Amino acid sequence: MTPSEQYVADLCQKSFLPFWNFPNPIGKKNKELCDVLVICGNYILIISVKDIRVSSHTDKKVQYERWVKKAVEDSAKQIYGAERFLKTANEVYAKNRTNKISLPPKNERIIFRIAIAFGSDNTFPLPYGEFGQGFVHVFDEESTSILLSELDTITDFTRYLTDKVQFLQGKYFSMPKESDFLAFYIQTGLDVDEKTDAIVSDGGLWESYVASKEYVEWQALLPQSKIWDYMIAQLHDYHISEETSDKFRNEYEEAIRVINLESRINRIELGGILDNAIQRKLSARMLRPLKGAKHCYVFMPLTPKNWEGKENELELRCMVARMENPTIEMVIGIGFGSNGDGQDVYDICSHYIPEMSEEFIKHAKEVQDELGYFKKPTFSNSKSYRKEDFKGFGLW
């Protein structure tokens, strides 16, 4: 990999985690498909990176045109070619040409095309949009770093890309930097008068946002969300290995993928709830589904008291949680604690139950009555677990 490709791959790995981030995958005729491929759920990010030095031509216009052709237009061609190949494939090979990367079902894929152009010293205006076969997002080194740092979950990042494309349709747009549009996006939610047909700024929006009280308050909330990031990585490392059977690998990866799709704002709430459950030494906590979610969580601290039957207890608690939440389709149970030898242990189970049979409800009710699981649940607003009660999950 070139230094610029490695830089982007490292940013993607940090933001989207290594198990859904694939540098230099292999495509048609055993050749490199693109520089980075990110796959999580139905999302596919095709990323091409070009590091092109500006020519020494004395005419600035010629410099710009030559740079755009090599740094942007050639990236768009590579991205379009990769997309054509992916439309015919159900899987691709990783860089090592041994491991296979499964792709989501063809009719469910949501593809984003991203060209990252280095070499202009962030001084050239970046073209973007339609290059012949679909919208291509174009970023330089500075904007790539800011975007992947601020929108560092797959859900937040892809939502931004989607909202931007929809918002700019039919509008004249002029801003010096992508980060200025990001600040505009964060502060306005793109909620502007529908008659607006032009968005123009001479810059400085990002710098102004970073200096604002709003940004400082947001940054103060982030540490507790990192619990969620840490837990995802630990769950994956603990349960997914070369020895994991295909059956359990698929089950674990599906559950971890759902967990990874939580947005940053959701992770703030979930991290606080998880931390609170640990601090209060609860036997378990059932979390009602967040707004718009079709899944809910059961958190269960692992202790010497429940260690022997921890897997069975987590399964049964998930069953009761499904009964108690009739609007959802999936329950994810997460057990966490120590094995007594100073090693962290993470158990996970998931149940996809879109419809409950009478027999299932009867059995879940019997479990609840006999074992008392979530028989008298208490309800709290998740926002009550924000940073004032945050104890750091032992990480800070």
Image (cartoon, rainbow, N blue to C red):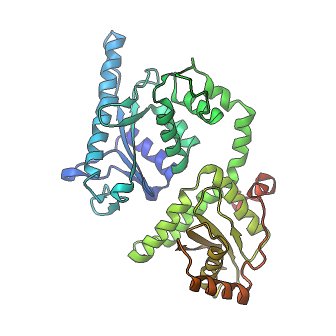
Above or below residue 183? Residue 10 is below
Q: Which residue occupies 29% across, 40% down?
A: 80
Instruction: Please name whichever residue, 179 or 189, is drawn nearer the observer in this view of the structure.
Output: 189
Q: Which residue occupies 30% across, 46% down?
A: 83
> Left or right: 309 with respect to 235?
right
For the view shown, which residue lies furthest in the front direction? 358
> Left or right: 371 with respect to 52?
right
Instruction: Please name whichever residue, 171 or 217, is drawn nearer the observer in this view of the structure.
Output: 171
Q: Which residue occupies 40% across, 72% down?
A: 242
Q: Quadrant of residue 314?
A: bottom right
Can residue 366 be seen here?
yes
Q: Which residue occupies 76% across, 64% down?
A: 276
Can residue 243 be seen here?
no
Q: Quadrant of residue 108?
A: bottom left
Quarter of the picture containing the C terminus is bottom right
Above or below residue 123? Residue 10 is below
